[in-house]
Amino acid sequence: MSDAGKRKPNVTYNAPIGSVDLVAFKEDGTSYEIWACLDCLPWHAELVRVEGELLVREWHAVDCPQFQNLISA
């Protein structure tokens, strides 16, 4: 299929968003670096505590390729 026939992903500020929870620390206790997503405008992150564990909740446009990679892993 040519590029002309493909739907462009909606990654604008008004795009529907979804979230994924990621561990905040590596197994050795060091923290992960968090970089903004360059593929979608609504990306943001927050720290949440779930059942006593500190997690990073990343929010992305649902069409964002990075979000699709995270939820399929």
Image: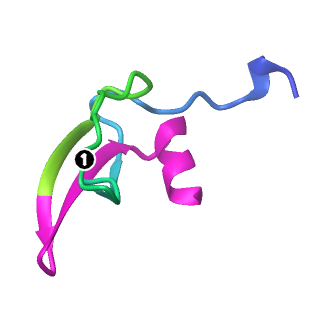
Q: Report the residue at 29% width, 47% height from top.
A: 58
Q: Secondary structure at mark 1?
A: loop
The image's colouring method is rainbow
> Where the N terminus falls, by quadrant?
top right
Magenta stretch?
Answer: 48-73
> Where the C terminus falls, by quadrant?
bottom right
Image coordinates for residue 7, horizontal then vertical, percent: 65, 32
Q: Residues within 10 Å of mark 1 (few under 14, many from 20)?
A: few
Q: Report the residue at 29% width, 27% height from top.
A: 36
Q: Is residue 27 left or right of residue 25?
A: right
**Amino acid carrying mark 1 in the image:** Thr
Image coordinates for residue 71, horizontal then vertical, percent: 51, 57
Image coordinates for residue 34, horizontal then vertical, percent: 27, 34
Q: Is residue 9 left or right of residue 15?
A: right
Is 68 included in the stretch rendered in magenta? yes
Q: How many marks?
A: 1
Task: Answer above or below: position of 37 versus 28.
Answer: above
Q: Report the residue at 42% width, 30% height from top.
A: 11
Q: Residue furthest right?
A: 1
Q: Nearer the viewer, residue 36 or 28?
A: 28
Task: Answer above or below: position of 46 versus 20.
Answer: above
Q: Nearer the viewer, residue 40 or 14?
A: 40
Q: Residue furthest front?
A: 28
Task: Answer above or below: position of 18 versus 35.
Answer: below
Image coordinates for residue 35, horizontal then vertical, percent: 30, 28
Task: Answer above or below: position of 28 versus 37.
Answer: below
Is 58 included in the stretch rendered in magenta? yes
- Read off the residue under disc 1: 30
Q: Quadrant of residue 49?
A: bottom left
